[in-house]
Image (cartoon, helix red, strand yellow):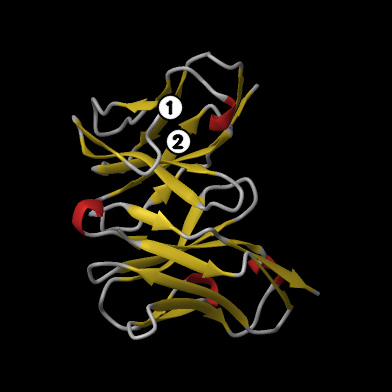
Amino acid sequence: NAGVTQTPKFQVLKTGQSMTLQCAQDMNHEYMSWYRQDPGMGLRLIHYSVGAGITDQGEVPNGYNVSRSTTEDFPLRLLSAAPSQTSVYFCASSWDSNQPQHFGDGTRLSIL
Amino acid sequence: AQSVTQLGSHVSVSEGALVLLRCNYSSSVPPYLFWYVQYPNQGLQLLLKYTSAATLVKGINGFEAEFKKSETSFHLTKPSAHMSDAAEYFCAVRGGGTSYGKLTFGQGTILTVHP
């Protein structure tokens, strides 16, 4: 059972480039979310989804887009990368919003 | 809106000593509270959760936390620290109202265990 799989694990971008961070889960979870982790700030919610076709904004959504076409996948898109988006990104999933979330191993993103 | 405050960004203990990591929360609804642990270069793993049942919650690896409504606290403890407990610990609260379902994390506490 793979759990939550994030790809890539590391990525370096130049300012203005776009990219998609992939997240897939094999637990048939309805609830999925994206966080960014920055030193001293804990994890901050970017976007989340309560099921296929349904997404909503979290605390820090600007500069990011998401879609949820299937239960399994929840990609995060950076439209035009900025140095302020340098961070570690975590995807998580759970049966519903009340249940503990299962986290992927993260994607370390650096934007030059 | 809900919030979480973890008192102390770094806590250092000796092996065998008591571990106490502090967490205070605010929430407009009865909270669901969680403690997660993060080892270097890994994602977060659930230690324990409070969901309005017993106020003393036992988790994995010998950790436990007590929910105190009057103090709006959910402190994490372990009677005897082990070297393998060295990690970063996060307290989180599930929101209500317009923040329903959203998890809000504290800033994290890095636990160092000395031999």
Q: Nearer the viewer, mark 2 or mark 1?
A: 1
- Name the image quarter holding the C terminus of chain A: top right
Under circle 1, the secondary element is strand
Determine the image quadrant of residue B73: bottom left
Give the labeled residue for mark 2. A5
Q: Residue at x 53, y 13 (%)?
A: A17
Q: Residue at x 56, y 31 (%)?
A: A84
Q: Earlier in the sequence, mark 2 or mark 1?
A: 2
Q: Position of residue B10 (x, y in %)?
A: 67, 66
How packed is label 1: few (under 14 Cα within 10 Å), some, or many (20 or more)? some
Give the labeled residue for mark 1. A22
Determine the image quadrant of residue B39: bottom right
Given contact means CB atoms under 8 Å apart, are the residues at marks 2 and 1 in contact?
A: yes
Q: Position of residue B75 (x, y in %)?
A: 48, 77
Q: Position of residue B82 (x, y in %)?
A: 68, 74
Chain of the residue displaying label 2: A
Under circle 2, the secondary element is strand
Determine the image quadrant of residue A29: top left
